[in-house]
Amino acid sequence: MPAEPLHLGVALDGAGWHPAAWREPDARPADLFDARYWVDLVREAEAGLLDLVTIEDSLGLQSGHWSGPEPRTDRVRGRLDAVLIAARVAPLTSHIGIVPTAVVTHTEPFHLSKAIATLDYVSSGRAGVRVQVSARAHEAALFGRRTLPRFGYAEREQPEIRAITSDLFDEARDAVEVFRRLWDSWEDDAEIRDVDTGRFVDIDKLHYIDFEGPHFSVRGPSITPRPPQGQPLVSALAHIDVAYRLAARSADLVYVTPHSTDDALGIVAEVRAEQAAAGRADEPLHIWGDLVVLLDDTAAAAAARLERLDDIAGERYRSDAQIFTGTATELADLLLDRQASGLSGFRLRPAAVPHDLVRITRDLVPELQRRGAFRTRYAADTLRGLLGLGRPANRYASTGGAP
């Protein structure tokens, strides 16, 4: 029996992470832009007692090319806004965390802070956000506020590209800092709502955040009272040093992409070193491993399904994360082995939904429960509670200043 139960989440992206998933017999491609589709997926994840779901998003159309659009028409193109999907799903679920992706590069942090605070209210304390950086030139062109050079994945290590990337991640760090300050800009008891005296709010308990940085100047306060969790969960996906640094300085949860247990050991050590350098060594920071999963009754059947999907797509599927094919028992073995590297949980990317999502909730979860490695009921009402994170104190509560 593991020392600590695992945490589990699923990453939802359209019909699944394999580009041919929408052509599977049980797929629902006609429903991808229907709210009921997303409600059904998240309810399935909640039936499996998962900690959270993340919802993918981007500012450009999906593409198999890292640097920009591609002309293929046999792939899913287009998506709904992840934050708005989350807001629709949240009131129709009761325990699972809802974590939409938000691209912070071209989006004002005041707007996103307010949106995630609102999500925390409509979910009764189950909101989070996955912050994402965009370095793509065609996405910058959608906004016209800045120009980014077009470059390919192979060019990312060039000094001038690394400098641009580093600046974008610094901007993301500032955006998260603005989020957090705005979430604290109302003290918890700022709302009086006293009909007899006619006082709805104690203005002395609303605070300017006065953030000044190279990317943003935000005075505050927010127009949304402090969220139920105080601070909704901030998470980020990280593959490289600047992303590890962002997560270590700013996040509560980081998703990483090791391809072996030894790889996981090295990544966890790097993230923890960045966390210590940021002065956060004593603060909780979850590190979860990402896996693309194809689950079936036998490993051969799972491998054959991947091969069939690749044939339909006309090319081999590649991912930043390890691609696992096998049974729920074999996946449970892998997760528990990799937990020993310092990972506290895993975010599983179903290659095709509903097939692989249902295999996670109805096969993998019971297998982990049999081993005493996963919960048998929800024991907390908030996402922070599910992850063992306390409700943070308000940084402005003792200042006594008023805007």
Image (cartoon, grey):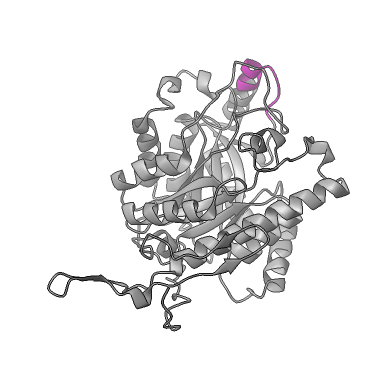
- 350 above or below 23? below
Q: Does the image show residue 134? A: yes
At 65% from the left and 28% from the top, the residue drawn is 63
Q: Residue furthest right?
A: 159
| Corner quadrant of residue 151 | top right
Whether residue 340 is visible, yes or no, is no
Q: Is residue 364 magenta?
A: no
Q: Nearer the viewer, residue 217 or 255?
A: 217
Q: Position of residue 183 (x, y in %)?
A: 45, 64
Magenta stretch containing residue 312, yes or no?
yes
Query: Who's the residue at 83% across and 37% down the image?
Result: 154
Q: Which residue is at the front of the view, 139 or 199? A: 199
326 left or right of 183 in image: right
Up the image or down, 343 lies above or below 15; here it is below
Q: Quadrant of the C terminus?
A: bottom left
Magenta stretch: dominant secondary structure:
helix
Residue pictured at 50% horizontal, 28% vertical? 15
Q: Which residue lies furthest to the left in this view?
A: 196
Tell whether 108 sits left or right of 265: left
Q: Picture coordinates of residue 212 (x, y %)?
A: 61, 66
- On screen, residue 349 above or below 275: above
Could you say where residue 261 lies in the image, as x and y percent from the top left? 70, 53
For the record, the magenta segment spans 308-317
Residue 21, quarter of the rendered image: top right
Which of 13 and 136 lies nearest the eye of the viewer? Answer: 136
Q: Count numbered badges in the picture.
A: 0
The x, y position of residue 332, in whole percent, is 55, 48
Seen at 41% across and 67% down, the residue is: 230
Side of 315 relative to 392 (left or right): right
